[in-house]
Each structure stands twice: as C-alpha cells, then as structure tokens.
Image (spheres, rainbow, N blue to C red):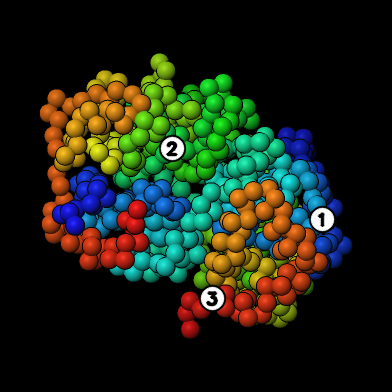
Amino acid sequence: MSAYTTNELMAAAIAREIEDGDLIFVGVGTAGRAFTLAVGLPVVASRIAQASHAPDASIYWGNLLTPDLSRMPEAWLQDAFTTWPCAAQLQETSQKIDMLGKARFDISFESAAQVDRYGNLNITRLDRPDGSLKTRLVGCLAQPEHLAFVRKPIIVMDLDPRRFVPDVDYVTSFGYRRGGTRREQYALPGPGPQRVVTDKAVFDFAGEDNVMRVRSLHPGVTLDEVTAAMGFAPAVAPDLAETPPPAAETVELVRTVIDPDKKLLRV
Amino acid sequence: MASASFLPPRRTIPFPDRKVVTMAEAASLVPDGARVAIGGFANYQRPMAFVRELVRQRRRDLTVVGTVSGIEVDMLAGAGALKKVETSYVGLEKYGLARNIRRRNEAGTVEIVDYPEVLSFDRFRASRENLTFWPSAYLGGTDILTHNPDIKAFDCPLTGRKLYAVPPADPEVVVIHAGAADEAGNVLWPSRRLMPQELDLDTAQSAEMVIVTVEKIVSNQFVRRNPTLNMLPAYRTAAIVEAPCGAHPTPTLGRFVIDDAHMQAYVAASASDEAFDAYLDEWVRGTADHAAYLEKLGAAHVMRLQEIATI
C-alpha cells in the first residue's frame, strides 16, 4: 500500500485552506464519487484541520452545528441528521439561511458537472449545441448563495475535460466573469471561488481577470497531464510548486480515527 | 378600503364541509392543474399516502412548488401527474438521481423551474407575508435569470441597487404529514421538533387550503393538555386525514425511520417508464387505499420501521 491515497492528499490540501475559527458549511451529498467530493473530502479535511492548526474551526452540516464527528451516522440521509449528537440543531430554516445571506460562513465546498476558467459552476443542466436540454442535473441547491456570500468557497472536483470546459452550459453559480461582465458589476458580497482542489493539482484564480491558475501539482503529476485533463488552458503560477503530501501522522489519523470504516472516502 | 386587487390571482378551492375526511376526499380537493406545496424536506416526512392517492385518482397537470424536493415529486412525475415543479433540487440523496422526473424533463413532458435553495424558501416567506415578490440581490450573471422570465430586475427605490423580484410560492393547496391532530383540526407538533417539521410549519403558513395527514387523530382533551404543541390551530387547517405510517417510505419524526429496502425497490423501478408503471400498478393503483397499502406492506415489515431514538 502506498504511503497515501489521492483522496488523503486532497483532504490534506483542503485542510491547509481552513483557518482556526472558520465556520465551515458542509452540504448533504448523494452517492458514489459525488458524495466523496461534496461531503467525504470536506468532512475529513475539516477534522484534519481541527486536529492540527484549526482546533476552533466549526462545521455546520445540514442544520447541525458541530455534529459529533467521532460518531458518524449509519446512513447519509436527512433521517440521520435528526438524531445525531451535536452542539446545536437549529430548527428554524431562516436561522441558517439568514446567516448565509449575512456572509457568516467562511468556507464552503462546491462540486459541479461543469466549471469554466472563471469559476462559473453548473449543477443544473447539460445542453446540446443548440441550447436544448440534453441531460437534467440536480438543480441549484444553495450553490448560488455559496458563491455569492461565502468568504472562501473551495471547488472540489476531479480533473476531466468534460467537466473543466471553456464555457459552462448553464451558469448555476457565478464566479468571476462571464463574457465581458465582471463580478464587481453584480455587487456580490463574497469574493468568489478561492481554490480548486482536484485529483491532480490545486488551482487558484489569479490576475486581473481571475482566471483559473495551476498553483501546485500533486507529486508525480506533470503539467502536461493536468492541461490534457482540462478543456481550456489554465494559467500557470510562476512559482509552480508540488502539492505537499500528507504527513504520515495525518494519514494515520484519517485511517484510524476519522474514517476507519471508509464511509467518507470510499471511492 | 382594503382591496384584493393587488394580490396575486389565486383560485379559491372550496373547503370541505367537515374537517376529518377520508384520503380519497382529501385528494379530491386538489383539482387537475392545481398548484400544490408538499410538506417534508428532501426524502423526509413526505405525505406520501396523499401523493399515492393523487396517483390513484389520476390527477393531471399539477404544479408542485417546493424547496428541496424528493421522492414525492419524482413519483408524481413518473405517474404522469406532474406538469411542472419549481424548486432548488429534485433528488433522492444517497439513493441518487430522481430518474422519473429526469427522464420526463429530458423528454419535454415535465417542466423544471430552477430557484436557488434560499430563494425557494424565501418564496414561501413572501406568501406567508402576502407579499407580491421577494427581493433578491444576488442572481446577477446566472442562468437562473435567463431561464426564468417570472423573475424581474428592478432598481431598489431606496438605494438604487439592482435587485430581482422573485415571485412568491403561492400554492393553492398545502399538504403536510404530522404526528397528531384532533377532529377540530388542531395539529400537534412534537416537542422535539427539527428543521423539517419547522419547514412544514413555514409551508403551512403559505396557503389557506392546508390539508394535514396525521399518524393519529387524538381527542380535543389531549390537545388542551398540550396547547404549546398546537402549532397549527384549527382555523389554519382545511382537512385532516388519519394515515398511520402515512409518510412511508420516508420517515416520520419519532415514529418511523426510512424504509431502506423500499427506497431501493423504488430506485430500481424508476429506471424506465415500464418498470415504474409496474411499480405503480403493484403499490399504488393496485392498492385500493392507504389501509390496503399498509396491508400489502405487512405488519411485521411496518413494525420493523419503528423509530426508537430515545427510550
């Protein structure tokens, strides 16, 4: 067995983006790889951060504040969210969504069917070239609000030229720019997506146009492999680095304490 | 003098002449083409016995307005009862995509109008407060706007800021599933109530015609002993239906957990129109009413779904 898996590397990379005291919003995911990207990696990363440099980072998961992450539920359903020990379980829907609208969340995690160079995200529909509907996706969820209001949205996706596209078919959530229109014009309170953590590299959004930029390559991955896995050419940081591999004790923590049953990082 | 002319047009559906009705009577209050809100959240505490009765009665052209939608919308879509849904999500959580509505939407027979999750909730707030729209400041640049002509841009008259007027939910009928109600129509919420129950309360405030299916009809004396739990007093409800295990296969707080095996069977059946038709023939059209449905599930099976979160 290798010293660490790609998921463990991604979780450690996400964990480094979490600061002490951050309020972290985690969604309720579906199944398979989509669950790992939307829920598994964010939760594991949050716990890695809490165990190292960010002991006071808190997780808001569903409507639970600081759920007891040492006691994971049997099944990932709203059902489980009603009986899970936690610090607070806010009943009133408006309590949470008003917090979102007042920009109280520091970190959110986004995955999508498509993302473009400006961080526009599509989780709603895939279209044919003529604009007619080809594939229906899940909808919007609260992703438009995340990209509008959260201080540091982190996109978590696998690199794939069908997912990293020149133009998304439908802008569910606005990133930095679309056509000639820039984010400032819409007076959104949040700064826009801050990082893209993938299975091959970590990106930020840089320069005057906030274009997606390779910041670090995972160990053993070349820049050519990264660009070959994207439908557009990303910018490249002048000080392109290697993504630091997770420390041995981090890997140990994930495997023995955080996710011993591989419920979070199954696939 | 107060005038109703500035309110959004609403069809008034006549109330039944008594509160406690049968499921068939309650479902018949929803006409073809009605605009309906269905209680619950994701795949939690949905009034599924009511939804099944709508399918038995072959209701058509319904519009469902929701926040985070699940199996209740997917079943109506798969049964050909749905014309349109306005929501932020339709899916089955860990059970994956909602395949009936996806297939019908891609075929062009069911329309999906997309709203972000917070705004889909705000639309119910607007209806509660009888507002003609809810203002949003953050839709700029999205295709939520370009695909939805009902959302209109305007300049804030106080700040000059560009805002978007989002239409209210304005359901004609709300249906929720709750624990208990009396014959007068007072509905009791559990003392330990959670986000989905609170959302039901929000939803129930958004319409006049509120139909409540309940696990059990209790005495008025019981209500009077627990007045703090009476969150939906009789004057807010139009009809009450007793439907034990009425959210099956979704859970009901303090009563039943999700029926995992049935959800799996549902997902398998939703793979094709033919398979789902067979599911509906077996479980919905093939059962005369909710009692027959419970009979088919079997007492042993239902009893295993009891929730014992605390002793």
Q: Position of residue A94 (x, y in %)?
A: 49, 51
Residue under the image location 41 percent in, 48 percent down: A34
Residue B57: numbered disc: 1
Residue A72 lies in what quarter of the image?
bottom left
Q: Position of residue B18 (x, y in %)?
A: 85, 66
> In the image, are marks 3 and 1 on the same chain?
yes
* Residue on which the image places disc 2: A113
**Distance (Cα) linking label 2 and label 1:** 38 Å
Disc 2: which chain? A
Question: Of the residues shown, which amino acid type is indicated by label 1?
Answer: Gln
Q: Is residue A87 visible?
A: no
What is the crowding at mark 1: few (fewer than 14 residues within 10 Å), some, or many (at least 20)?
A: some
**Distance (Cα) linking label 2 and label 3:** 36 Å
Q: Position of residue B213 (x, y in %)?
A: 71, 65
Query: Which one is in front in this view, the residue at disc 2 or the one at disc 3?
Result: 2
Disc 1: which chain? B
Question: Of the residues shown, which amino acid type is indicated by label 3?
Answer: Glu
Residue under the image location 16 percent in, 39 percent down: A220
> In the image, are marks 2 and 1 on the same chain?
no
Question: Which residue is most to the right?
Answer: B17
> Going from the N terminus, do you reach mark 3 or mark 1 first?
1
Residue under the image location 59 percent in, 47 percent down: B99
